[in-house]
Image (cartoon, rainbow, N blue to C red):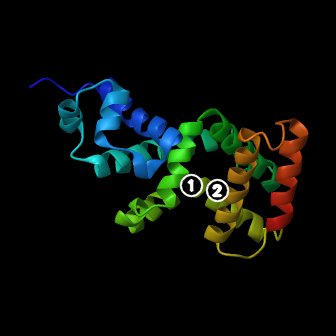
Amino acid sequence: MRPLDPDKREKILNSAYVLTGRQGLASVTISGISKTAGVAAGTLYIYFKNKEEVVQLAYAAVEDKMTQAMYRDFDINLPVRQSLKQIYINMLNYRLNHYDETVFIDQYQQSGYIQLNFSKQLAEYEKQNKPLYDLLEKGQREGIIKALDAIILISFFDGAVRSCSTGIIQKLFPLSQQLIDDCFDLVWRGIS
């Protein structure tokens, strides 16, 4: 038996993102994924058992890519505000440059799919985002970040990035350095 082609697998996962960006996660079908990926439905089933597996693995793949992008140029030894702003900018850039993937993530997190492996996914999220947890803890030790549970702070932070990127994509306001600075300042005031 021939080994599976990683490029074909990636095309299939990317098709799930593209279709979610166009029509929403609930409307994504195996037929649509295979057509968008340019593979036969039978071929898709060689790589994945069913739509649920495609969705779960697509989520894991995009979370990995987004997490890597979040921590680009991250240095916990810098002042907390500066380190957190770097994460904010990285997240915002990722969301603006990978629209279909971020629509997919947002819809996945609001769907029943997240409940299928929630405990496992939360543990993986905490492990992947240890730098952010550590940074928030550092800020709390220094007395510059509110003494709230980290998941509350992260949810607030993530929601602010999501709202800003959505506003830019929907052309509610133009992207500028001033906008990035102002939006981050609002986040900083909210958690400090």
Residue placed farthest to the left in the image?
1
Quickly name the residue at label 1. 129
Q: How many marks?
A: 2
Q: At numbered mark 2, what does the secondary structure look like: helix, strand or loop?
A: helix
CA distance separating discs 2 and 1? 5 Å
Q: Find numbered disc 1 in the image and state the secondary structure of the residue it sits on.
A: loop
Q: As rendered, which of 29 and 66 lies closer to the eye?
A: 29
Residue 168 image offset from top left, x and y in percent: 76, 41
- Horizontal side of residue 109 vs 49, given as left or right: right
Q: Residue at x 51, y 38 (%)?
A: 22
Q: Residues within 10 Å of mark 2 (few under 14, many from 20)?
A: many
Query: Is residue 80 positioned above or below 9 on the image?
Result: below
| 154 relative to 168, above or below | below
Question: Residue 67, percent across and down?
Answer: 55, 45
Q: Is residue 116 left or right of residue 158?
A: left
Q: Which residue is mark 2?
A: 132
